[in-house]
Amino acid sequence: MNAVEIIAKKRDGGKLSRGEIGVFINLYVSGKIPDYQMSAFLMAVFFRGMDFEETGWLTEIMLDSGEKVTFQKPDNIYVDKHSTGGVGDKVSLILAPLAASCGIKVPMLSGRGLGYTGGTLDKLESIPGFRTDLSLKEFQDGVERVGCVISGQTASIAPADRLMYALRDVTGTVESIPLICGSILSKKFAAGPRGIVFDVKCGNGAFMKNEVSAEVLAENLIAVGKGMGRKVTALITDMNQPLGETVGNLLELVEAMDFLKGKQAPDLYGIILELSAEMLIVSGLRSDYDEAKILIKSKLEDGSAWSKFEEMVSYQRGDLSIFAKTSDLPQAAIVDTCKSSRSGWLTGMATEEIGRLIVELGGGRKTKESGIDRLVGFKFFKKIGDEIKSGEPLAEVHAGTREQAGMAIDRLKSIITIGPEPPEIPALIYRRLS
């Protein structure tokens, strides 16, 4: 079949064969199919969808379009974690060294922030000299030697995804679940993991706003991953408020480092404990969740997880000396406090708006080419369900100018809802799927 026939078949709801998907994707990557025909194909998939088998074929073909890391050891200890994105989500910064300190090999390819969600690479680049542009050989060697590496996607990894995603972003087809699965899994599996644990965020600060849509995405990721011979599980976790205490690149990095040293926000600790236990089960290093959690807690308490973080940073040429003293840390020009104008209980947060406010302050990108201010952000003092007195601090605001700080304080007062009665506190973890 030619390109037009393949587009028309999917447009009319037909199931494509592996050969048809392969021909179309490979011709596009080689420049023999124009962008307008790929755009039509993406829109057909958006409206007609793909079943698990088609999505698996799509993922394999996107994966095979570029280079892949292949680890030589035959066991399952190579395990990654992927989050679908949220606000204040600094989990990867903690989880990679923590899991590695438990004996897991963590080959983690991460991304930059775009839109209202923060990027792991942007947070790590708050460390002077830290390299996120490792070659595939450096990446592979680091995983074997250190136990964990967090780096960015190279141009040689899944080029089909890179080309297709650029079109999805401008054709309104980003939210297609088969295309999301193909994009995520092709990049993740290119890094060589034998298993992946997915943290599928759900709530007003996530791409999936409700539990039903989060479950559909998780089920697709699991089905396709298992169909490709990998071990895959997923947790659906809450994103109706920022995770932990901070939002913003440097602030989140410091919170992650403090976590590894023993200062742990309860909600962040709960998520980390469950995800890292899941990674240990997937790896086969532990078969019981209680035993897995005992090991994880011991690695946090004896300093092993922090030492592994230092080792990873050193391998990737980062310099942690500025973090030795709080007084040496760079700080935004203006640090001010947002105080409550009434008493009551914190009943909700417009979490996506918090992420968008960070972008307005310069801490996120409006386009892929935008620079960012790593110093701006917020530190929150309250969570949903906390009682609040009038005049009590709600958040610390880090901004570049006095005008920006004032704007952020005014916006936060409308974003954080205070009511007369205690609310129902959202669950931290909604479901585990395997």
Image (spheres, rainbow, N blue to C red):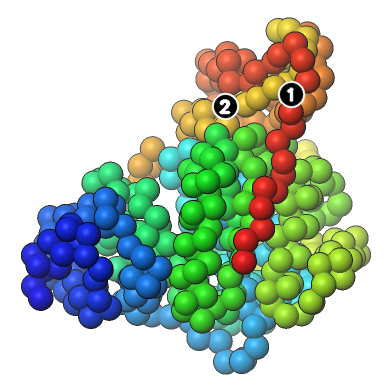
How far from the left and from the top, in percent, is residue 58? Answer: 33, 71
Residue labelled with disc 1: 423
How far from the left and from the top, in percent, is residue 158? Answer: 36, 71
Task: Give the secondary structure at mark 2.
Answer: loop
Q: Quadrant of residue 289?
A: bottom right
How crowded is the residue under tag 1: few (<14 C-alpha within 10 Å), some, or many (20+)? some
In the displayed structure, 80 sits above or below 367; it is below
Residue labelled with disc 2: 350
Q: How many marks?
A: 2
First in sequence: mark 1 vs mark 2: 2
Task: Give the secondary structure at mark 1.
Answer: loop
Q: Quadrant of residue 415?
A: top right
* Camera sees residue 47: yes
* Quarter that holds the N terminus: bottom left
Q: Amino acid at mark 1?
A: Pro
The residue at 27%/62% (across/down) is 163
How far from the left and from the top, in percent, is residue 27? Answer: 16, 74
Please state if 388 lies on the left or on the right of 353 as rendered.
right
In the displayed structure, 44 sits above or below 423; it is below
The residue at 63%/78% (across/down) is 78
> In front: 341, or 311?
341
